[in-house]
Image (cartoon, grey):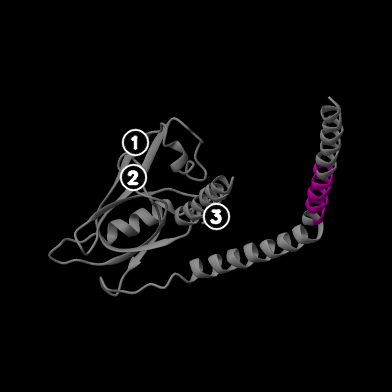
Amino acid sequence: MVYLKWAFRAVVALLIVGFFHYTLPQHDIARVTDTYEKRIDFGENSLFWASSDVGNAETTVNRDVFFIQAKYPNGDVMVYRNEDTGWGWPPYFKFDTSNLQAEAADLKSSADAPQWVVIKHYGWRNEFLSIFPNAVSVRPATGPEEQIIPWLNIVILTIFAAIFWAIYVRWRRFRAARIDPVLEEIEDGYDAASDALADRRGRVSRWLGTWRSKK
């Protein structure tokens, strides 16, 4: 029972961490190597694609999607999709997909004359499932070593921790005041019933013992 309890807690914690890691904004410093548009046929990974651009017809079969190719200072590559989030989730309220694509195209550079940029995005990259992070904004960086402090993430996680702690404390107080006394009464009643049953069995055993002694 204890193992199941801790396993449940671990699964819940993993889901919460995964939710925030996917949803909260992240910042990458890279150089844009190319931008292009590609027709995507949605399949089992459709959950990780945003809806159609605001103002366009909604489709769940296929549509054209913008992509931004980039390369990190260490040589690793990354491909970002560029889709509107609109009024949906996550709440980035992104409506400027075409403008962002134009900005990214204007910031393209080569390895000989790199122009480093900061790409703000959310989501994950998974080659096996063809999942791409969604670029939210792009701007020139001061250099490949620019340090970015995720103030928004810090504020959101702090608020979440405060809310979680407040709920946890109130739950502990409610349990101590309402639930634990009831459980103790049930346990005491069970112990009293067990003692009474044991006493009754003892009496029966002693009575049977008197009959055996007479024989």
Rendered residue at 85%/42% (across/down): 196
The residue where tag 3 is placed is 91
Q: Of the numbered discs in the image, which one, if any, rests on residue 89?
A: none
Nearer-the-camera pick, 169 or 67:
169
Residue 62 point in image, percent of width and height: 41, 32
Picture quadrant where residue 163 is located? bottom right
Residue tagged 1: 39
First along the sequence among labels 3 and 2: 3
Mark closer to the observer (3, 2): 2
**Where residue 25 sits: x, y (%)?**
45, 60
Which part of the image, by quadrant, shows the C terminus?
A: top right
In percent of the image, x 62 and y 68: which residue is there?
162
The CA distance from mark 3 to mark 2 is: 22 Å
**N-terminal label among 1 and 2:** 1
Q: Looking at the image, is mark 3 or mark 1 earlier in the sequence?
A: 1
The kind of residue on which mark 3 rests is Pro
Compare residues 99 and 10 and report the one nearer the observer.
Answer: 10
Question: Does residue 13 show up magenta in the picture?
Answer: no
Residue 21 image position (x, y, % from top left): 45, 56
Label 1: state its secondary structure: strand
Tell me which amino acid carries mark 2: Asn
Mark 2, other Cα within 10 Å: few <14 / some 14–19 / many ≥20: few
Question: For mark 3, does the 10 Å Cα neighbourhood hold few (<14), some (14 to 19), or many (20 or more) residues?
Answer: few
Q: Crowding near pointer 1: few (<14 within 10 Å), some, many (20+)?
A: few
Q: Which residues are magenta?
A: 181-194
Q: Which residue is mark 2?
A: 126
135 left or right, relative to 198: left
From the image, which quarter does the N terminus lie in?
Answer: top right
Q: Nearer the viewer, residue 112 or 45?
A: 45
